[in-house]
Image (cartoon, grey):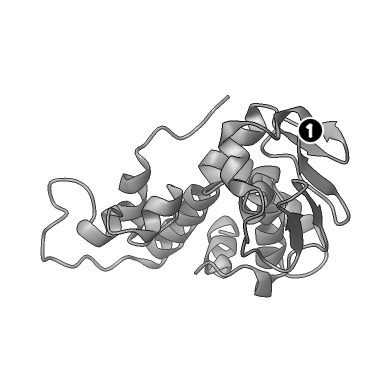
Amino acid sequence: MARTIQPDCRQCRREGCKLFLKGERCTSKKCAMERRPVIPGQHGNSKRRVAFSEYGTQLREKQKVKRMYGVLEKQFRGYYEDACRMKGVTGENMLSILERRLDNVVYRMGIASSRKQARQVVNHGLITVNGRRVNIASYIVKAGDIVAIKENKQNNEFFKSLRGSKVVMPKWVEFDTNNFSGKVVALPVREDIDADIKEQLIVELYSR
């Protein structure tokens, strides 16, 4: 299985913003963006400001979103092409597809503290969709799908702190921390995605 092996904090520093790849650490003083908010490498501390070209700006936005969702180029391009075939605004359709990935849904429901951790939870077979075990992180959920922690894994040490806790989540998903079961209430729309993403730049890049 292909995956990104570059250090998480280095990716945030390269994009110049928090991608929230390490869960709680990203909101603490230990966050690399708090301690060293410069581009990685020997020229990171240089005072020289390099103005990006139009292409460079579009490329950086695409790289940022890819890293945020933990998706590699071939798969990301595939999501763009799927979005083009859908009705509506291409950029918003693409973000909706990314949000509906199972690993992102697990993260949004508060089962995991980051998308990377959520991907591990899914890959290890701890999640079910409509009662069936799904271990594919890129599985695209639909409105009405029931996402739950596998019954015989609910006493796992990893989930103990989750039981009974209050989780802040977007309105298009819901999750009961007492019975470890949630539901995709509706398909996500642009207003539900709070991340600072300029999806139109990505569309312009792929439209070249």
Left or right, residue 142 beside residue 50: right
Residue drawn at x 55%, y 49% as measured from the top left: 69
Q: Residue 79 in the image: x percent, y percent?
A: 68, 49
Where 49 falls versus 145 (above or below)? below
Assign the N terminus to one quadrant of the image: top right
Q: Residue 140 in the image: x percent, y percent?
A: 76, 45
Residue drawn at x 38%, y 43% as measured from the top left: 8
Quarter occupied by residue 147: top right
Identified by mark 1, the residue type is Glu
Left or right, residue 74 beside residue 55: right
Left or right, residue 52 beside residue 3: left
Q: Nearer the viewer, residue 38 or 27?
A: 27
Where 103 falls versus 49 (above or below)? above
Q: Nearer the viewer, residue 202 or 151?
A: 151
Where 173 falls versus 147 (above or below)? below
Task: Using the rendered image of the protein, determine whether residue 38 is visible from the camera's viewpoint.
Answer: no
Residue drawn at x 26%, y 68% as measured from the top left: 51
Task: Using the rendered image of the protein, determine whether residue 96 is visible from the camera's viewpoint.
Answer: yes
List the single residue furthest toward the bottom: 191
Residue drawn at x 60%, y 62% as measured from the top left: 203
Quarter occupied by residue 96: bottom right
* Pointer 1 local density, CA inside 10 Å: few below 14, some 14–19, many at least 20: some
Give the residue at mark 1.
Answer: 151
Assign the C terminus to one quadrant of the image: bottom right
Q: Residue 91 in the image: x percent, y percent?
A: 65, 65
Q: Nearer the viewer, residue 72 or 141?
A: 141
